[in-house]
Amino acid sequence: MDSKHLMSTYVRKPVAFERGDGVWLYAADDKNGRYLDALSGLAVCGLGHAHPAVSAAIAEQSAKLMHTSNIYAIPLQEELAARLCQMSGLDAAFFCNSGAEAIEAAIKLARRHAHARKQPDARVIVTENSFHGRTLAALTATGNPAFQSGFEPLVPGFTRVPYDDLEAVQAALEENPGGSAVLVEPIQCEGGINIPSPGYLSGLRALCDRHEALLILDEVQTGNGRTGKWFCYQHEAVLPDIAVTAKGLANGVPIGVCLARQPVAELFSPGAHGSTFGGNPLACRAALATLDTIEHQDLCSRAGELGDYLLGALRARLSDCASVREIRGKGLILAIELAQPCAPLVDLCLEQKLLINVTAERVIRLLPPLILEQDQADQLVDILAGCIQRFAEPEKPGNGDLP
Ligand SMILES: *Cc1c(COP(=O)(O)O)cnc(C)c1O
């Protein structure tokens, strides 16, 4: 491999995939082995790889029309916006190309909201351990000093509070009455799959209402059916003022969206914001095909059921593993937290042809495709539990054996 012409922003595994089929990935140099993908390209390919409905939609659209620019009407964009508004309970959409860009749009709306109310200090309250992306304002919102280090000065106007702490948000809102927004993930994903206490989101909603602040939910990773509902906030029947999503929306075609309630959405007037590629016919067609498939195959419910099944199976298999601190999840966002740092597990699983990820040092993160079948879920559990046992308790009899 020759990567000297790539900026080294990533630590890459020495494997290149050439093609995929459903939950399986095939490496270029490995004719007889396939990898079970329990990551979905970081929650992007919810329908697995090379899904025929999405591939056909992209092929057809690319042969017809890919891009015209937002100077002209784009019927597919209007159709997708209507669809997302109906799914989310919100009123209007702005399309861009990534999660970070969708967060930027939300932050710009929050600033317009404060200025419209003649509040010069447009403040966004964000949380520790959050992840909102790598552009400068999204990076500022991100609660991980390691990602921010060396990129100062960061963007002004952010206040950080602990996650899952309503009192801290209340104190921050009281300090800046009238001009604030609260930006959180309904589950902190990159930060270690931190699931807040029941009532956190509805508590935030009540606080934002009381202080006339905007509630912005980052559903970049949790959206599009992954937790068992279209949007994770729907588990608590909370309606935010703004929701953003991206990753799983078009099964691999870059797209991001910022959705807002009226009158918040109206704070963007013509010329206020824009994106050259945002919402082009190709991306919108891919997103519509993805959402159609999730809906027709009832994959939101499937994600919920399969998530419960995986939680149960992992807990049963790992019940006597002293190194396992907690196994938690919602739908197909699953975490196994160990007592020790466990980054080497990624390579152990890779050797066994299972793709997983470790975040926050000691948290194994699973984001399998929504189309995972039960026997594939069983294979996932077998391989992963075997690797965890060998990694965490190598001296225990039997654990040296390969799964
Ligand atoms: C991945 C992610 C982002 C950033 O999305 P990009 O498409 O990488 O810019 C933002 N928020 C959350 C919660 C994410 O998981």
Image (cartoon, rainbow, N blue to C red):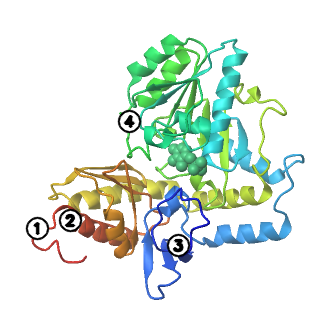
> From where the camera sits, is residue 88 visible?
no
How many other residues sit within 10 Å of disc 2, few (<14), some (14-19) or many (≥20)?
many
Q: Nearer the viewer, mark 2 or mark 3?
A: 2
Residue carrying label 3: 22
The circle drawn on residue 196 is: 4
Q: Are marks 2 and 3 in contact (CB under 8 Å)?
A: no
Q: Are marks 1 and 2 in contact (CB under 8 Å)?
A: yes
Circle 4: residue type: Pro
Q: Are marks 2 and 4 in contact (CB under 8 Å)?
A: no
**Does dot 2 land on a helix, a strand or a loop?**
helix
**Residue 399: x %, y % from top left:** 16, 71
The circle drawn on residue 396 is: 1
Residue carrying label 2: 389
- Disc nearer the start of the sequence (3/1): 3
Determine the CA span between mark 4 and mark 1: 35 Å
Circle 3: residue type: Gly
**Residue 269: x %, y % from top left:** 81, 29
**Does dot 1 land on a helix, a strand or a loop?**
loop
